[in-house]
Amino acid sequence: QVTLVESGGGSVQAGGSLRLSCAASGYTYRGNCMGWFRQAPGKEREGVAGIDSGGRTSYADSVKDRFTISQDKAKNTLYLQMNSLKPEDTAMYYCAIAPVCVSVLASIRTAKAGFWGQGTQVTVSS
């Protein structure tokens, strides 16, 4: 059973930074990818950042050069460093794993129930 627990969300002013963490356990997939998607009220889920089993990273255009995804395999933890935050970054952020990963961001965005955590809220004020 996959367990993903996010932390690190909060409220910041525009231009600020946050670092999200995701503690993962219960999976032994190969060829998987992990990442973050976000969802704001009334909006569709958006794949934000992902990393595949080879360590290659992908980012949505909306966060490129501001967000950085990384992982500590020894700790089974995924991170998302978010800098230069904007009000439009306000959303619930979810850590997700895709057992089969063809397109990283698409696979993260469409992760099935049971393969994402409870989410952590990020609120950016102007």
Image: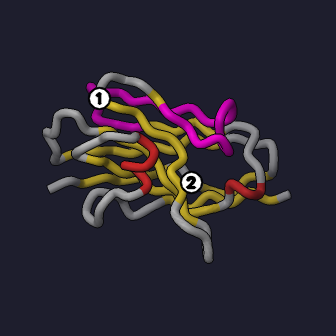
Q: Where the N terminus falls, by quadrant?
A: bottom left
Residue 115 on image: x %, y %: 28, 57
Q: Distance between the residues labelled 1 and 2?
A: 25 Å
Q: What residue type is labelled 2?
A: Gly
Q: Residue 53 carries which label?
A: 1
Total labels: the figure holds 2
Q: Which residue is drawn at 31% across and 48% down?
A: 97
Observer-side mark, 1 or 2, equals 1
Label 2, residues with CA under 10 Å away: few <14, some 14-19, many ≥20: some
Residue underneath mark 2: 9
Q: What element carries label 1?
A: loop
Q: Which amino acid does label 1 sit on?
A: Ser
Residue at the bottom extreme of this rendering: 42
Towards the viewer: 26 or 59? 59
Q: Which numbered disc, 1 or 2, marks the residue that appears first in the sequence?
A: 2
Q: Given contact means CB atoms under 8 Å apart, are the residues at marks 1 and 2 in contact?
A: no
